[in-house]
Image (cartoon, rainbow, N blue to C red):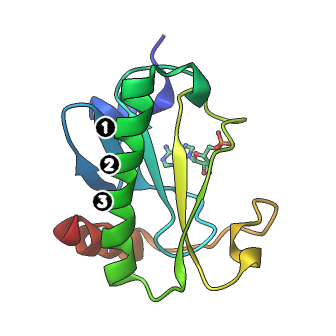
Amino acid sequence: MPTIFSRIISGEIPCYKIAEDENYFAFLDINPLAKGHTLVIPKQETDYIFDLDDHTLSGMMVFAKKVALAIEKCVPCKRIGIAVIGLEVPHAHIHLVPLQSVHDINFTNPKLQLSKEEMDALAKQIAAQA
Ligand code: AMP
């Protein structure tokens, strides 16, 4: 059974897409800690990020860098924070979170409620820079 993220990659489940290449995919987190909170995933379906082979793992970081720089151009922030949790979805992913302070990357914070229109516009804006 494919993971929810594989179903997003295949287009079976909709997402607010940011970027894609042959091996990686990025889309907005639907429960964002901050405006522009994005997930970067490998297309290869592996649960634990540190089970990825070195090539896939390092390529994922390079892809995440490109996405982070695009987010920075669209969302006012001091920098983009990066986190790996992976306790909810068993498909390796990196969280990219725009930060004004360290508190913005506290995963116990209440999540933002953004409208579909806001998410859509934000994704398009970031995608245009990626
Ligand atoms: P974790 O596995 O603990 O890193 O958390 C999984 C993250 O994936 C959470 O921040 C969720 O909000 C996010 N998430 C789960 N389902 C979706 C989805 N369909 N689209 C976008 N983000 C999702």
Q: Amino acid at mark 2?
A: Phe
Estimate the x, y position of residue 29 in percent, counting from the top left.
51, 56
Q: Which residue is mark 2?
A: 63
Q: CA distance from mark 3 to mark 1?
A: 12 Å
Q: Residue at x 27, y 31 (%)?
A: 23
Is the residue under label 1 in contact with that under label 2 (CB below 8 Å)?
A: yes
User: Residue 92's spot in the image, x, y percent?
Assistant: 53, 32
Residue 13 seen in render: no
Which residue does the numbered mark 1 point to in the structure image? 24
Camera-side mark, 2 or 1: 2
Q: Position of 10 compared to 44: left or right?
A: left
Labelled pair 2, 3 in contact (Cβ < 8 Å): yes
Q: Earlier in the sequence, mark 2 or mark 1?
A: 1
Of 9 and 62, nearer the camera is: 62
The residue to which callout 3 is attached is 66
Mark 3 or mark 1: whose residue is earlier in sequence: 1
